[in-house]
Amino acid sequence: MPKFVTIGYGDEAGYAKTPEDLRAAAHAHDKSLLEQGALMGIAGAPVQVRNTLRKGIETVPEAYLTSKLPIAGFAVIDADDISQAIKIVSDSPCAIAYGVVEVWPLEHTL
């Protein structure tokens, strides 16, 4: 089955203004995905890593990409196709709480 990487963006302000019943349903949805085998986690502090031409490792303790909302979490989900993956993430906390979820097809697994 195809795999998809999802990135959830959201902030506390959007979460706080979302009705409690919708937040609870979204968390129940995520719990269900975990029980079905999805790999999910809350985003920690990022570190950029470079090793140009293998001449030495350089790190920068911050995100490379920037967005209007902070990254809240990641998941790897199974879905038949991109349409099903979109439907799956549409009930996640970031999608319902004034955030956004990106869905990236994982085209090749190593």
Image (cartoon, rainbow, N blue to C red):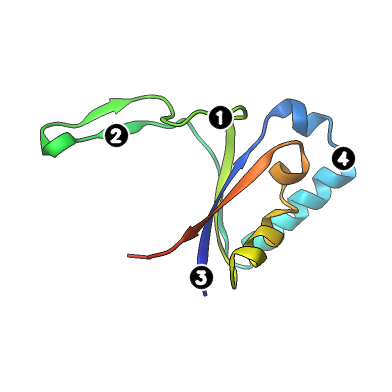
Image point 85% across, 46% down: which residue? 22
Kind of residue sitting beneath label 2: Val
Residue 107 image offset from top left, x and y in percent? 42, 64
**Where does the C terminus fall, quadrant-wise?**
bottom left
First in sequence: mark 1 vs mark 2: 2
Closer to the N terminus: mark 3 or mark 1?
3
Work out whether mark 4 precedes mark 3 in sequence or the reverse, and give the earlier one: 3
Q: CA distance from mark 1 to mark 2?
A: 19 Å
Q: 42 or 2, which is in the foreground?
A: 2
Real-space Cα distance between discs 1 and 4?
26 Å
Q: CA distance from mark 4 to mark 3?
A: 33 Å
Q: Which residue is mark 4?
A: 20
In the figure, is residue 107 to the left or right of 89? left
Decide which of tag 4 and tag 2 comes sooner along the chain: 4
| Above or below for 63 versus 91 | above
- How crowded is the residue under tag 2: few (<14 C-alpha within 10 Å), some, or many (20+)? few
| Disc nearest the viewer among 4 and 3 | 3
Residue type (three-letter) at the residue carrying disc 3 = Pro
Residue at 51% across / 70% down in the picture? 2
Horizontal and vertical percent position of residue 28: 77, 55
Q: In the image, what residue type sits under mark 4? A: Glu
Q: Which residue is mark 2?
A: 49
Disc 1 residue type (three-letter): Ser
| Classed neighbour count for the residue bearing mark 4: other residues with Cα under 10 Å, few (<14), some (14–19), many (≥20) | few
Q: Which residue is mark 3?
A: 2
76 vs 84, left or right, is: left
Name the residue nearer the viewer: 4 or 43: 4
**Which mark, by number, is residue 67?**
1
The first of marks 2 and 3 along the sequence is: 3
